[in-house]
Image: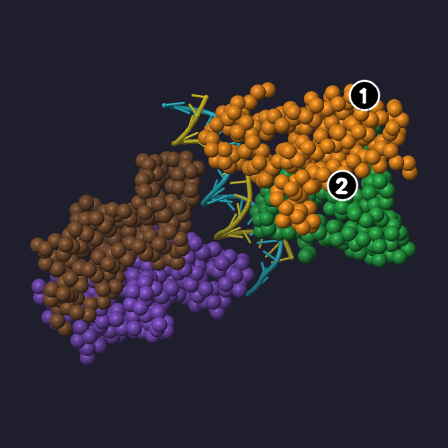
Chain colours: A brown, B purple, C green, D orange, E cyan, F yellow
Amino acid sequence: MEYSDKQVQIMEIAEILFAEKGFNGTSIRDIAEKAQVNLAMISYYFGSKDKLLEALFSYRGEHLKLKLESMIEDKGLSSMEKIDVLIDHYIEKVMKQQCFSRIMAREQVLNHTGITAELIYQMKKRNQELISRLIHGGQKKGEFKKNVDIPLLMATLIGTANNLVATQHYYREINNFQSKTDEEFQKHMKKKLSQHLKKIFKAILTNEE
Amino acid sequence: MEYSDKQVQIMEIAEILFAEKGFNGTSIRDIAEKAQVNLAMISYYFGSKDKLLEALFSYRGEHLKLKLESMIEDKGLSSMEKIDVLIDHYIEKVMKQQCFSRIMAREQVLNHTGITAELIYQMKKRNQELISRLIHGGQKKGEFKKNVDIPLLMATLIGTANNLVATQHYYREINNFQSKTDEEFQKHMKKKLSQHLKKIFKAILTNEE
Amino acid sequence: MEYSDKQVQIMEIAEILFAEKGFNGTSIRDIAEKAQVNLAMISYYFGSKDKLLEALFSYRGEHLKLKLESMIEDKGLSSMEKIDVLIDHYIEKVMKQQCFSRIMAREQVLNHTGITAELIYQMKKRNQELISRLIHGGQKKGEFKKNVDIPLLMATLIGTANNLVATQHYYREINNFQSKTDEEFQKHMKKKLSQHLKKIFKAILTNEE
Amino acid sequence: MEYSDKQVQIMEIAEILFAEKGFNGTSIRDIAEKAQVNLAMISYYFGSKDKLLEALFSYRGEHLKLKLESMIEDKGLSSMEKIDVLIDHYIEKVMKQQCFSRIMAREQVLNHTGITAELIYQMKKRNQELISRLIHGGQKKGEFKKNVDIPLLMATLIGTANNLVATQHYYREINNFQSKTDEEFQKHMKKKLSQHLKKIFKAILTNEE
DNA sequence: AATGAATGAGAATTCATTCAT
DNA sequence: TATGAATGAATTCTCATTCAT
């Protein structure tokens, strides 16, 4: 699916507003004003507000799959190293697409119907399969323990990242990082989160009890 | 703050609907109908829809602090045991108040203003302080490592639990637990989550690298 | 179905406007303004604009059936006299409910769906049955010819009356009746129409060819 | 007035849609899509949606006058035969232009302004004059009675034909003509209608009371 | 204390039309 | 001549809230 410049422009503004105020809390008036676009253009371009959300999901959902697929086959990496790559990749994505992550985090809680629900489900499934293959690979090679509850591990990966992003202002305040620039703070948080999640995965996947 | 029976009745219906459809996606008409209460009663009792949410937050936020406070001082428990108690306590609360947890999970992402934001902030802070005291206690006694990023650990606790609860239908499907009764499934999930989080906390708090 | 005073007030204004400008040509804004009622009241009372039309149809459709049913059984009247009564009754109704008749005349042409279509169909069917019983009765008694195309006769009854009502200004102009008062003109037109239709029915039902 | 192929194409699609859904119920988007024509073309070709309707009226109104004019002067036909020819001619037109007839039937009920109203008025007047001349001719020759209410007769001609065409599905159902092909049914209906109206005209114009 | 009726503001969407090309 | 993009006005409907009782 290809989107025109105008459509992308609208989607990106919508993304910010949906993240800030929620889907239902954002009116297409808000979006139109912020995007400096005529009110009617949103229906004109996307058909409806719902369809705009769907478009956003499909637009943002596109770009994650490719790189990882090849990495998995890379023989030069240990299973644990692959896990680390995956974690960093996921964090990278969440950090880069913070707004979208917040929307996802919010909307996955709701009983969505239609295409949105389907897209969320597909993303979740794709992630699940990727991690499963990695972990099963590591188990076969004896690098990882048996009996790993993969969905729980995913919940930790996704839940921790989303929760941190959602409450980052709090994280900043607690750590007295107000003096840092935004960029510095983001970089720091990303690093810390990466270390934290890697430690968790390593513990769950390899530690004896 | 005390609430009358009618008020509680309304709040509990509202809680379910807010969890299902989001705050903005729920109209007070919906609530009034489901609660079999006159439409005007909600404004009458709570002042406004926003105030109803605030009331719900304060109502649900009440009951968590008391038990834990005393437990912390209990000399008969090791620091790790105390952590385990806290984790179970938190899971218990999330599982028992799933609707409210989902609302919290959703609403904390938004830039709330007013009392709601304040209440969320207060809860977060209280949790944070509790864990901090526990961990610092353990560190002083040499049971826990230094250099623990407590906010990150909290993000994992809260994020994992919320994410799992929010996507439990997915967890159920993946694990082929459709045959289990609801109760069985909930019990199983709770147990698994508890083990999972305890393992993580133990690893983060005690493992050498 | 009972309607409150406000509802009747709204329906009667709506009827006039629908007759003048058509259903789609009339906005609920128009109706609200003319009825001196808040815009939202229409949705509030009727649910939607479509439902308002349905309500109007059911409201106006009520009052025609009763009187005629008994008349049919009256042994003191000849079949032809009964037909005359029916014609006068129908004309009376059309003249009294001119606006509604115009709406009916318009809307029956459209491919309506839902309750409106059903109500139109029911009215048509009821009329059809009534006339059929009358005519078959007359045929049995030998007063009427065999081989009468009843639907065609109905088309003439309804079509002529509606067409005349719809184009009455034209009828007035042609006949130079501008000097007459409205009332006089209506009375005259009613009389003429009655004679005309009775003559037609008599010819169709009794004349030899 | 001459219309280009594109214009005719648009008008003919518009005619169908106006007949089905009414003028106000049809958007120029509908028309453009069905006619496989660019949306802007309609305003471009006709100026506006209203003007499109006017164009349609003038386009369809063209073709009726010519043939009849000469027939009237034909000395070889009796007055009654001329009436029969006129009835058949009118029915032929209505049947051939069913969509347009339905539009006319609908729109004549509305308080139209502008050219449309004028065109409807002109058509009506022309028909009226034609019939008047025929009937007055017959009266002079002693073939027809005096005291014929010509506008009423016209209302019957037009009203019956339009009503039948508008409710033909009903006529088909009542008569169990579903098995007939469309063509057969139309032919049958046309024949019946012709007989019916001729009988009526004969009765009104010649019968003694 | 409780409620049915009412209201004004704002929601999403559709419309006919116009503009730049 | 033809068109895709754009627009402002108007549409119906829903919303949270308030008022009179």
**Is residue C32 positioned above or below A201 on the image?**
above
Look at 91% across and 55% down and name the residue there.
Answer: C76
- Whether pointer 2 and pointer 1 mark residues with C-beta atoms closer than 8 Å, the reply is no
Relative depth, front residue between B179 and C81: C81
Name the residue beneath numbered marker 2. C156
Look at 11% across and 57% down and name the residue there.
Answer: A81
Direction from residue C81 to residue A200 in the image, left or right: left
Q: Secondary structure at mark 2?
A: helix
The quadrant holding residue B101 is: bottom left
Look at 25% across and 46% down and name the residue there.
Answer: A63
Direction from residue B192 to residue D169 in the image, left or right: right
Q: Secondary structure at mark 1?
A: loop
The quadrant holding residue D166 is: top right
Look at 16% across and 55% down and name the residue there.
Answer: A72
| Image disc number at residue D186 | none
Amino acid type of the residue tagged 2 in the rendering:
Thr
Relative depth, front residue between C22 and A163: C22
Name the residue beneath numbered marker 1. D75
Could you say where residue C29 lies in the image, as x and y percent from the top left?
59, 40
Direction from residue A49 to residue C116 in the image, left or right: right
Could you say where residue D89 lies in the image, as x and y percent from the top left?
71, 30
Q: Are marks 2 and 1 on the same chain?
A: no
Could you say where residue B71 lies in the image, as x and y percent from the top left?
25, 75
Chain ID, mark 2:
C
Residue A104 in sight: yes
The quadrant holding residue F12 is: top right
Quadrant showing the C terminus of chain D? top right
Relative depth, front residue between A171 and A109: A109
Could you say where residue A151 lies in the image, as x and y percent from the top left?
25, 64
Please give the count of numbered marks on the rendered protein.
2
